[in-house]
Image (tube, helix red, strand yellow):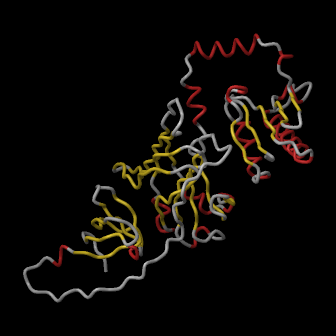
Amino acid sequence: MIKIGDKVKFLNDVGGGVVTGFAGKDKVYVENYDGFEIPCLVSQLVFIDSPGMNKTEKTEPRPTQSVRKAEPEFRETPGTWLKGKDAAQFYFCFVPADSGNPLAGDVTLFLVNDSNFTLMFRFVYIKPTGINTIKTGTLQPNSKVMLSSFGQSLLSELPEFGFQLIYFLSNEDDWQAPIVKRFKVNPLKFYKETSFQFSQFFGQNAMTLHISQNIQAAAIDKLTEEDFQKVVQEKMDKPVEEKPARLRTSEVVEVDLHINELIDNSAGLSNGEILEIQKDRVESEMKAAIQSRIKKIVFIHGVGQGVLKQEVLKLLKTKYAKYYTQDASFREYGYGATMVILRK
């Protein structure tokens, strides 16, 4: 029976540490040789020594036990470069052991790098007593890594989760701003069936949180007032005729979702009614583009508060999940458009 203070080695990894506490019936916290406290299954540890065994009296030698090496359910995936994955898309995922009943077993936490960037990360638990670093490392392009796991008994004591991310391309000439993101997950989410949706990353239901969705908003925040006024003035001075509201070719369909481009008069409509009109247009244009075998479709939603963009992305990922979605060209649309690739 492993106790607090016991020295252990990791069965499936290099190194070891000292047991500092219990995280459930079959899980403990181990402080490794680098001073980081990480959760580990008892079955994945090999006992080395105990403070209680260092006594002067002679003790019987501890019989060695053969421990069967357990294969992990999930493995870190190798990286690969994929065409079109040039947007920084990073996700924090909760994957239940039983996708049909998330509360039936442990929930495993993953970091997913859904881009061609190399990603350096630090994952922490943020508690009132301080910050505990759980895992650090480098994640290759288009790959994922397991961070930690927890059982139902710990749901009421979930810490705040935090990420520090640095991402880069090996051949780029520009800096990418680091990402610092915190997540406070309400335990009630684990009791709601709608919180877990099918994930292409795992082939089963998972709760997926977008780490990088505010990267563009952060970049906008860095614009000075002078920069902002300059952009606004350029938009005002630019004749409407220079850019049609809707461009259609055999290669690409461009749809402007601004309400004044969709209907003649929006007076008297509530924000909710306007949003429904815009979402209906997205769906009708997607159906038409697919039927016409268009290669790409671009939805221009503007920057604003990001409500329309988030609703568009939600619709695309719900009803058209098999098509790849990314931010459209910054040079052509700034931060205000989403591109859907329908076929190569």
Tell me the residue at 85%/26% (across/down). 245
Q: Is residue 97 above or below residue 189?
A: below
Q: Is residue 335 above or below residue 166?
A: above
Tell me the residue at 50%/62% (across/down). 155
The quadrant in which the N terminus is found is: bottom left
Q: Is residue 66 above or below residue 236?
A: below
Tell me the residue at 51%/57% (across/down). 145
Q: Quadrant of residue 10?
A: bottom left
Q: From the top left corner, tell me how far across and down residue 259 is, in percent.
A: 83, 29
- In-image side of 233 versus 169 (left or right): right
Tell me the residue at 41%/71% (across/down). 41
User: Between residues 12 and 79, which one lies in front from this camera angle?
Assistant: 79
Q: Quadrant of residue 74?
A: bottom right
Q: From the top left corner, tell me how far across and down residue 117 is, in percent.
A: 55, 43
Q: From the top left corner, tell me how far across and down residue 191 is, in percent.
A: 61, 63
Q: Quadrant of residue 233?
A: top right
